[in-house]
């Protein structure tokens, strides 16, 4: 009887090699893809991290928008927070303001305005109040978005809270 | 007569291999998910947040040249491990820090000459200053003991520093 062909041992080794190389190739694509997907889920826990605090400063004057932000009392989450973005809008127009811990004051200032003025972001359980010079525009809707640092990169999360404001 | 070919795995071995594979996958997924979700701090076999509901206390702070005197009366059914202090100012509530001060259920403790928080940060209390005191409980996380600050906005108590 002729026994041409691969022996069972060689066939098994070939199948194992094929499986290992297939796994390596798939992992090469799959792992970065999963990592990217996981990065985007980093924001899930910050969904309600910041909220507008009813301190009586959530209102506007002729050229200033006042608002108070409270951070959720969770110290672990607070470690990744580097600031927030504020979206100001009214019918037909809007603008975005970036608040980053330690940044110099510009149009955005701390309400207590101690000099030298730098932006303070509320830590876990804290409340901070701000003033934004909006020129001659008065915005009636404010939204706050947490900004976190993920693997050294800044990432703005979705809207954490929003509020309708009126004249002070 | 044909000879029966008996090569291959027996049903018993195949079933055991499948069970082993399923168990291995379950263990891998469990440890991955545990690491991803994280373990919660517990007290009385429940999430420690639930124990915060049972905390009832009175706090008093008296400013002094040598440091502050803190008096805590625990009127609830949960022992306190300490307090977290926040300073209430115009438009802001700022964290001052954690003061370790165990107070058993029904007991009253007084800590004198307080000049720093548990992490060594210097703290000066001034008379008429408005503070918020939140209870801190001791719970367990796995085999570790861990302290947990109850949410000041829900469980905190506002006090005015006395002279």
Image: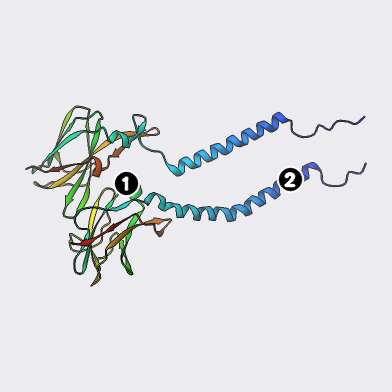
Identify the residue under disc 2.
Answer: A13
Mark 1, Cα crowd under 10 Å, few <14 / some 14-19 / many 20+, is some
Q: Is residue A114 above or below residue A137?
A: above
Residue placed most toward the observer, B90 or A32: B90
Instruction: Judge depth for marks 1 and 2 and give the one in front.
Output: 1
Tell me, yes or no, if residue A68 can be seen here: yes
Mark 2, Cα crowd under 10 Å, few <14 / some 14-19 / many 20+, is few
- List x then y, in percent, for residue B11: 72, 30
Q: Where, by quadrant of the figure, is residue B101 drawn?
A: top left
Tell me, yes or no, if residue B146 can be seen here: no
Tag 2 or tag 1, which sits nearer the N-term? Answer: 2
Residue placed most toward the observer, B144 or A29: A29
Give the structural element (helix, strand or loop) at label 1.
helix
* For residue B79, side relative to residue B65 (left or right): right
Do the dots labelled 1 and 2 sit on one chain? yes
Residue at figure coordinates x 18%, y 48% from the top left: B87
In the image, farthest residue toward the front: A91
Residue A144 circle label: none
- Quadrant position of the C terminus of chain B in the picture: top left
Residue placed most toward the observer, B66 or A37: A37
Q: Chain of mark 1?
A: A
Mark 1 and mark 2: span between their CA atoms? 53 Å
Residue A75 circle label: 1
How many marks on residues?
2
Residue at figure coordinates x 77%, y 42% from the top left: A9
In the image, farthest residue toward the top: B106
Q: Chain of mark 2?
A: A
């Amino acid at each position: 009887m002729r026994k041409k062909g691969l022996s069972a041992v060689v066939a098994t080794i070939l199948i194992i090699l094929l499986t290992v190389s297939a796994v390596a190739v798939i992992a090469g694509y799959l792992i970065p893809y999963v990592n990217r997907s996981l990065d985007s889920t980093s924001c899930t826990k910050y969904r309600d991290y910041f909220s507008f605090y009813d301190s009586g400063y959530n209102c506007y004057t002729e050229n200033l928008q006042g608002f108070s932000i409270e951070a959720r009392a969770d110290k672990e989450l607070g470690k990744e927070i580097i600031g927030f973005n504020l979206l100001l809008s009214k019918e037909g127009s809007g603008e975005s303001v970036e608040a980053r811990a330690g940044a110099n004051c510009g149009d955005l200032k701390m309400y207590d305005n101690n000099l030298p003025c730098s932006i303070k972001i509320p830590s876990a359980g804290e409340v901070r109040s701000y003033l934004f010079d909006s020129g001659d525009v008065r915005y009636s809707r404010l939204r706050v978005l947490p900004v976190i640092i993920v693997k050294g990169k800044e990432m703005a999360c979705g809207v954490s809270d929003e509020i309708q404001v009126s004249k002070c | 007569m044909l000879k029966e070919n008996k090569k291959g795995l027996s049903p018993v071995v195949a079933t055991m291999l499948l069970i082993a594979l399923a168990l291995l996958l379950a263990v891998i997924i469990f440890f991955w998910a545990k690491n991803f979700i994280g373990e919660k701090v517990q007290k009385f076999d429940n999430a420690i947040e639930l124990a915060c509901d049972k905390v009832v206390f009175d706090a008093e702070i008296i400013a002094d040249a040598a440091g502050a005197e803190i008096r805590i009366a625990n009127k609830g059914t949960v022992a306190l491990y300490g307090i977290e202090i926040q300073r209430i100012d115009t438009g802001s509530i700022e964290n001052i820090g954690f003061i370790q001060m165990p107070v058993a259920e029904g007991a009253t403790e007084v800590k004198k000459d307080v000049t720093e928080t548990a992490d060594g940060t210097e703290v000066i209390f001034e008379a008429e200053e408005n503070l918020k005191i939140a209870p801190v409980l001791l719970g367990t996380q796995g085999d570790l003991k861990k302290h947990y600050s109850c949410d000041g906005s829900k469980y905190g108590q506002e006090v005015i520093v006395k002279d």
